[in-house]
Image (cartoon, rainbow, N blue to C red):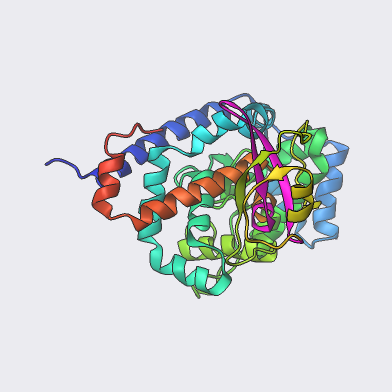
C-alpha cells in the first residue's frame, strides 16, 4: 500500500525526532559527575529550600544526592543558534517545507481548540502553532536532560548566569510540589525548559493555565493546556489583538543605517522611524511603538520594523531572529491551512526532511 503524503510527512517527522534524540544523547552521555553537595554554596541553597520554602530535609537531600553536573550542558550554553548563525542560516532551520507542512497538520488537528483560544485571547492560532514549531517541532523534540541536572549544573557551575539558574532551580522545586510532579522525572532542554512549549519553571508557575478544564496545568502532555498557556503568556505580555507583528523596511538613500546588533527595546515609534528615513508600510498611527530590526540576509543587510506584537514574541525568547522566524512560520502555516489539503500535499510531496 502506498503511503499518503501526510503519512509520509508524519513518518519523516518521526525519523527526524529520532535523529534529534540521538544527537541529544551525545550531549547527555558526555562526561558527568555527581554534584558535590558538600560545597558551601550547595549547602546554603539546600538549607534555603528547607528554611524558606518549607521542604523536608530528607526530600531535599535525596533529590540533591541524585543530581549530576554535566559538561555537555555547559558546552551547549556556548553555542545557541541565535548567537552563532546569521539570519539567513537561522531562518533556513525553521522555514522548511517539512516544518511548514507539519505545522499545517498540527493546526488542522487542533483547529477547533486553537480557534476557541484565539476567540478568547486574541492571540492568532497560527502564532501558537508556530511557537510550538520553532520550540520543539510540535512537541516531538522536547529535550532529554533531567531538568534538575540542567538547572543545578548551570546554577552552580556556570557563573555567568548562576543567579538566574539557581532561581529557576528553586522554582522547579516549587513547581514540582504545586503540580504534584516527580522532580527527578522532569525532562527538558539543556537550559531546563519543559514540555512542548519549553516553559522554564518560573514561566510554568506564572503563566500556565488549565485549558482543558480538568483542574490541572499540564504542559507536558495536555495539548489544550499547552496551547492555552502559550496564548496566556502573550496576553500577559501585552499582545494586541488584530494588530500587525512586523513589516519589511528599507532606508531612504540619504538615511543613516544602524550599526551593531538589534536592541530589543520599543524606544521608537512609527513616526520617529519614518523621520529617520526608514521606509515601511503600516496602518498603525504615528504614535505606535516600534523597533528597527537589522539582520544579515543572504544578499546583504535586511531590515524589518517590529511592532508591539513582535516585541511580545521577543519576551518568549530574547532574540530578534527567533521572533521573526516565529512570525514567518506562522504566516506559512496560516497560508497552508487555508489551502485545500490536496494542494498542500502536492506542494510538499517529496520535500526533504530535516
Magenta stretch, main secondary structure, is strand
Query: 294 and 248: which one is in front?
Result: 248
Position of residue 339 in the picture relative to residue 160 (left or right): left
Estimate the x, y position of residue 67 in percent, counting from the top left: 67, 40
Is residue 102 visible to us here? yes
Estimate the x, y position of residue 269 in percent, counting from the top left: 77, 55
- What residue is shown at x 28% (from left), y 34% (from top)? 350
Position of residue 240 in the picture relative to residue 330 (left or right): right
**In this picture, is 87 found above or below 270?**
above
Identify the residue at the far left of this view. 1
**In this picture, is 244 found above or below 78?**
below
Q: Quadrant of residue 320?
A: top right
- What residue is shown at x 83% (from left), y 44% (from top)? 163
Find the magenta span and give its range: 287-311
Query: 151 and 56: which one is in front?
Result: 151
Estimate the x, y position of residue 333 in percent, counting from the top left: 43, 51
Residue 289 part of the magenta-drawn span: yes
| Quadrant in which the N terminus is drawn | top left
Position of residue 171 in the picture relative to residue 112 (left or right): right
Residue 159 part of the magenta-drawn span: no
**In this picture, is 64 found above or below 241?**
above
Estimate the x, y position of residue 190 in percent, counting from the top left: 62, 38
Amino acid at each position: 500500500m502506498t503511503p499518503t503524503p501526510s503519512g509520509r510527512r508524519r513518518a519523516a517527522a518521526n525519523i527526524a525526532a529520532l535523529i534529534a534524540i540521538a544527537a541529544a544523547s551525545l550531549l547527555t552521555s558526555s562526561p558527568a559527575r555527581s554534584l558535590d553537595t558538600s560545597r558551601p554554596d550547595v549547602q546554603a541553597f539546600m538549607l534555603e529550600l528547607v528554611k524558606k520554602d518549607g521542604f523536608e530535609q530528607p526530600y531535599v537531600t535525596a533529590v540533591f544526592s541524585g543530581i549530576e553536573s554535566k559538561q555537555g550542558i555547559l558546552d551547549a550554553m556556548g553555542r545557541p543558534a541565535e548567537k552563532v548563525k546569521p539570519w539567513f542560516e537561522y531562518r533556513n532551520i525553521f522555514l522548511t517545507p517539512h516544518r511548514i507542512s507539519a505545522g499545517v497538520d498540527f493546526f488542522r488537528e487542533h483547529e477547533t481548540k486553537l480557534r476557541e483560544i484565539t476567540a478568547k485571547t486574541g492571540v492568532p492560532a497560527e502564532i501558537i502553532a508556530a511557537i510550538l514549531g520553532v520550540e520543539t517541532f510540535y512537541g516531538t523534540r522536547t529535550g532529554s536532560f533531567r531538568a534538575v541536572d540542567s538547572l543545578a549544573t548551570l546554577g552552580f557551575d556556570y557563573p555567568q548566569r548562576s543567579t538566574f539558574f539557581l532561581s529557576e532551580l528553586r522554582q522547579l522545586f516549587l513547581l514540582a510540589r504545586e503540580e504534584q510532579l516527580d522532580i527527578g522525572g522532569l525532562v527538558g532542554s539543556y537550559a531546563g525548559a519543559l514540555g512542548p512549549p519549553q516553559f522554564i519553571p518560573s514561566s510554568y508557575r506564572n503563566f500556565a493555565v488549565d485549558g482543558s478544564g480538568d483542574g490541572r496545568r499540564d504542559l507536558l502532555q495536555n495539548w489544550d493546556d499547552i496551547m492555552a498557556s502559550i496564548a496566556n503568556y502573550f496576553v500577559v505580555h501585552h499582545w494586541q489583538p488584530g494588530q500587525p507583528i512586523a513589516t519589511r523596511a528599507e532606508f531612504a538613500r540619504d538615511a543613516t543605517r544602524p550599526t551593531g546588533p538589534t536592541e530589543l527595546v520599543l524606544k521608537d515609534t512609527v513616526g520617529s522611524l519614518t523621520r529617520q528615513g526608514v521606509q515601511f508600510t503600516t496602518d498603525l498611527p504615528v504614535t505606535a511603538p516600534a523597533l528597527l530590526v537589522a539582520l544579515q540576509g543572504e544578499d546583504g543587510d535586511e531590515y524589518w520594523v517590529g511592532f508591539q506584537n513582535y516585541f511580545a514574541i521577543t519576551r518568549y525568547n530574547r532574540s530578534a531572529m527567533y521572533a521573526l522566524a516565529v512570525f514567518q512560520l506562522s504566516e506559512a502555516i496560516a497560508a497552508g491551512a487555508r489551502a485545500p489539503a490536496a494542494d498542500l500535499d502536492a506542494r510538499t510531496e517529496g520535500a526533504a526532511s530535516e
